[in-house]
């Protein structure tokens, strides 16, 4: 499971120590200005092709408490705008993979890069800057129970210093996008599981992240609700946001036929375009 602290961005004024030169133009060219959500596809944009968003280069993560590495010499490159399923049994290394992207863990060896950030070289005060370009969605939602739907989403902007007028403009648009415009004043316990996950997705996307990490986002949902959530994640992906989703749901993976990265005992055992859940399916 990913660290709860990774849900929200941090200090807006942190500098860029640890950043590397991007291979292509950054997020400003790919997203509308705040207050102008646009779900039109960016896949044919000249800034999209060949832009590497995530790189794991010979990454090994060894915990002192385990004889076997959590990740063992893993090499993966994920382009901007890709939708990638991360699969494998419990203990295969999926959570470690995600935590490395967030700088919640550091690799024992190898390099981890996300956009222009060389994650290995980030100092503590600069980690929040990385997390401003990553949105996170969790299986258990992790909503603030005493805050309304609106307040939960707005909080993700408040903590990075967004102006109140910008928050008041953007949050209603995001809630409309996820189908919750009529429930802005509800508390989490007044919502269904699917609605709570929509709030979590709205919170993760409201800052227009370059990358959306989804850790078993449909794990607690029924099949129909899961399909609705996956449709929403696909729409977000079509804006140009890179989506990496860890899942055990073979029905979702088989039906969507996106790129599949499979881990087993910490090793990368399969990396397949338009893949299915199992190699023999």
Image (tube, rainbow, N blue to C red):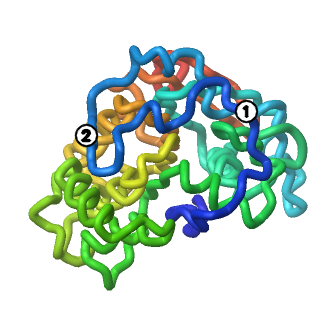
- Asked whether 273 or 281 is in front, the reply is 273
Query: Where on the picture, by quarter, is residue 256?
Result: top left
Q: Nearer the viewer, residue 169 or 218?
A: 169
* Residue in the picture at 58% in, 63% down: 12
What secondary structure is marked by label 2?
Answer: helix
What count of labels does the image hold? Answer: 2
Mark 1: few/some/many CA within 10 Å (<14, 14-19, 20+): few
Residue 63 shown left or right of residue 26 in the figure? right
Residue at figure coordinates x 50%, y 37% from the top left: 27
Mark 1 to mark 2 CA distance (whole Å): 38 Å
Quarter occupied by residue 75: top right
- The image position of residue 218, as x and y in percent, is 36, 50
- Residue 214 location (% of width, % of height): 47, 48
Label disc, if present, on residue 227 of the rendered structure: 2
Q: Which residue is mark 1?
A: 21
- Give me the residue at 22% from left, 57% from top: 175
Other residues around mark 2 within 10 Å, as few (<14) / some (14–19) / many (≥20): some
């Amino acid at each position: 499971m990913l660290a709860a602290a990774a849900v929200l961005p941090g200090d807006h004024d942190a500098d860029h120590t640890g950043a590397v030169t991007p291979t292509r133009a950054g997020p400003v060219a790919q997203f509308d200005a705040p207050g102008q959500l646009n779900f039109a596809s960016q896949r044919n944009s000249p800034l999209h092709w060949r832009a590497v968003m995530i790189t794991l280069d010979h990454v090994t993560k060894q915990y002192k408490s385990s004889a076997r590495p959590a990740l063992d010499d893993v090499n993966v490159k994920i382009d901007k705008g890709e939708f990638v399923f991360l699969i494998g049994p419990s203990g295969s290394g999926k959570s470690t993979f995600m935590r490395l992207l967030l700088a919640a863990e550091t690799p024992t060896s190898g390099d981890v890069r996300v956009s222009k950030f060389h994650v290995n070289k980030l100092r503590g005060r600069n980690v929040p800057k990385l997390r401003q370009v990553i949105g996170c969605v969790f299986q258990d939602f992790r909503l603030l129970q005493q805050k309304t739907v609106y307040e939960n989403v707005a909080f993700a902007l408040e903590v990075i210093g967004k102006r109140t007028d910008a928050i008041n403009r953007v949050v209603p648009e995001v809630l409309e996008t996820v189908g919750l415009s009529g429930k802005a004043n509800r508390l989490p316990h007044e919502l269904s599981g699917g609605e709570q996950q929509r709030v979590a997705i709205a919170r993760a996307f409201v800052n227009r992240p370059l990358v959306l990490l989804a850790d078993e986002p449909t794990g607690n949902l029924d099949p129909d609700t899961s399909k609705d959530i996956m449709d929403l994640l696909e729409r977000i992906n079509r804006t140009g946001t890179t989506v990496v989703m860890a899942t055990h749901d073979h029905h979702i993976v088989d039906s969507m036929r996106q790129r599949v990265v499979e881990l087993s005992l910490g090793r990368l055992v399969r990396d397949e375009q338009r893949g299915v859940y199992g190699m023999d399916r």
